[in-house]
Amino acid sequence: MTSVRLDGIGELVTNDPRAGIGSLGVVLDASLVVADGAVVYAGPQRTAPAADRLVDVGGRAVLPGFVDSHAHLVFAGDRAVEFAARMAGRRYETGGIGTTVAATRAAPDELLRANLARLVAEALRQGTTTIECKSGYGLTVADEERSLRIARELTPETTFLGAHVVPPGTDPDSYVDVVCGPMLRACAPHARWADVFCDDGAFDADRTRVILAAAAGAGLGLRLHANQLGPGPGVQLAVEHGAASADHCTYLSDADVDALAASGTVATLLPGAEFATRSPYPDARRLVDAGATIALATDCNPGSSFTTSMALCIALAVREMGLTPAEAVWAATAGGARALRRDDIGRLREGTRADFVVLDAPTHMYLAYRPGVPQVAEVWHGGRRVVPHWSGAAPVR
Amino acid sequence: MTSVRLDGIGELVTNDPRAGIGSLGVVLDASLVVADGAVVYAGPQRTAPAADRLVDVGGRAVLPGFVDSHAHLVFAGDRAVEFAARMAGRRYETGGIGTTVAATRAAPDELLRANLARLVAEALRQGTTTIECKSGYGLTVADEERSLRIARELTPETTFLGAHVVPPGTDPDSYVDVVCGPMLRACAPHARWADVFCDDGAFDADRTRVILAAAAGAGLGLRLHANQLGPGPGVQLAVEHGAASADHCTYLSDADVDALAASGTVATLLPGAEFATRSPYPDARRLVDAGATIALATDCNPGSSFTTSMALCIALAVREMGLTPAEAVWAATAGGARALRRDDIGRLREGTRADFVVLDAPTHMYLAYRPGVPQVAEVWHGGRRVVPHWSGAAPVR
């Protein structure tokens, strides 16, 4: 297969501290060589090997593709009116997640597939080369199964979230029996992960334990919605069960922070949700200072965070959550990969997937420094340029 | 000239309350007909006149192009490192506006022109069809003159801001004499407006009055940087002098709000600056409720708000400043036009310029509902489609 060498990389973010400066492993005046969908070389241009084809990126920054490790993308309908009412300080009584569940159940497969494909393509255009996708708007055996079956067509990172909410009018314990029994059996073949929404109004500690144990028994990796709406047992349960990630982490005790720091469980922070619900942001600084590993993800869903923009999440993490631009970029790439227990993405070094973005900017700092501006010029996915350069103009100097 | 009719507009925002629903004058199932660079018809599809060419926009929303009425785009260099230091809570002693002034003075015309063209194109791709551009990084007669001369090549909305700061080592009164004398004479031919940064550390009330009077005498319209860093006389001076706009308006007394509400002076709010400096946001709700006219603009500049995204400003105005999505969209279109005293832009009705955007979304609400996502599918400027559709996928349903 043809090898390609990108020269003229002003700043290459490798996320390999041995390869360059700081935790991002930054190499200046760098080259990246890719072949057969993988990285062959990531380092200084002066020592780069030859390749069949040369591309000059004109001093731009190159970084690993974003890894969005938390998204809910199989659904129908929107909730724009509910959003506007919430922003105006009004309660929106006839709405919430039930709206999306009803629309999703009523939708033909083709509509769910088209909506999902659109969001995955939209994310890819913005530099997201890996995206996790949860079920959770079906809440019946058949609707959860088809959600995951469709999701699996577009991403390998699928998560069974039958335990999103207890469907109205259903006894919680009976629903947990369904989730752990026929629903899990139907869904497990299409899922890599299982997730539970452990919070007031969703699943309590005992029910969460039961579901996590059943999912682990079915061979699924674990992740958890934890401590989003208030303090609770979610983070401790995630750590106890060896979950790959505890997600949201808005309300943490010192013991929660310590447990995350001492564990292999990533704290996945989702600032799009706080933005769209006008909630307090999680304290990323506290987690990083304690030694916890963090990821940033979009939580893309029609109710509480309808964004696919990892760049916005980075800007919000810097503005609102105390991260440096470098820490935020790491969390949105290598952190997401850790949250999905993947070694082949989130970094650029020999052997990793050739998933990367070329920014219309000289450094990774611009993602926070220029909020809202589409700065992803090119996206390469598995060594192929899937989103071509859309500007052509030289960066501001 | 060929006329073009856009059919299948799911929601047409006209900003003409007589034409449709609410202050946005929304027409559902609409058509827009353009010819000779102007709007010929904006209304229901069933009564639309015939045209030479038909375009179907597939149920998408169409709204007037954004009017960004406050930007500083003629400069060289960036201040990303200063930004990162500020976000980390560190003072960055050797920096500030002086960095940009030095880089701008040292830059050849071609570099200033290339940087400006890049930012104007970047803004246009995001739906900004009119953009104001200030000088203010030259601060000598020659450098201010060339800044405006270059700006005028790319936008008619040029603003002389020699009174941005007093250059270090210069006596303030002597500098005001230069601004009002040779600098104004050199710059006025290239400028439509004059602006003064009236705040602590910049120009006080007396000096602001002198500069405004001189600029008015030279035939320039007036606008003012007012009440950004603290309470002060800026808003009152803007209203007294009949300025088109008082910009920032972060720290307002009740008397300031009343003065704005009783005047023809628009309050231009710049949430990108508060975002990038971690400052309190202005209270847009209070201004609207008092009856003041507001505009939203980017304040794009390399120091305190390096964004060209009007969509981000809309999302921030809804999240942080108490506006509804409709109010924010109005402020970013019709409000900006008022702040520039323009009748031919910011609305879509017979006779206005055919400057509009097609959103990859069914309603204007999506600009706040989907923060950070590039949703401007097409941009039409003077009746020509200058930015083609970049997705092609149907909106999520």
Image (cartoon, coloured by chain):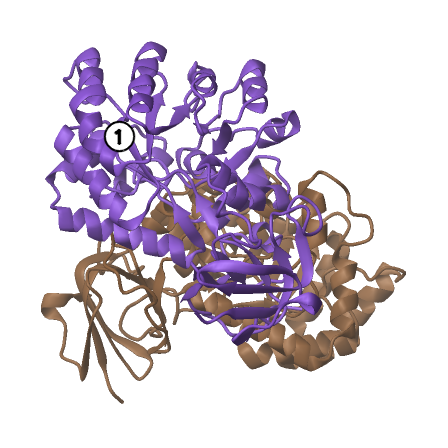
Chain colours: A brown, B purple
Give the residue number, with chain letter if any, for mark 1: B92
* Residue B201 in sight from this viewpoint: no
Amino acid carrying mark 1 in the image? Tyr
Residue B362 is situated, as x and y percent measured from the top left of the image, at 63, 62
Q: How many marks?
A: 1
Left of B379 or right of it: where is A170? right
Q: Tell me which residue sits at (24%, 38%) in the image.
A: B190
Q: In this orientation, which residue lies closer to the viewer: A211 or B83?
A: B83
Neighbour tally class for label 1: few under 14, some 14-19, many 20 plus, Cα within 10 Å: few
Residue B225 lies, with reference to residue B311, above or below; the image says above
Looking at the image, the residue that sits furthest to the front is B1
Residue A83 is situated, as x and y percent measured from the top left of the image, at 68, 49
Q: In this orientation, which residue lies closer to the viewer: A325 or A179?
A: A325
Left of B116 or right of it: where is A203? right
Residue B98 is situated, as x and y percent measured from the top left of the image, at 20, 30
Q: Tell me which residue sits at (48%, 20%) in the image.
A: B239
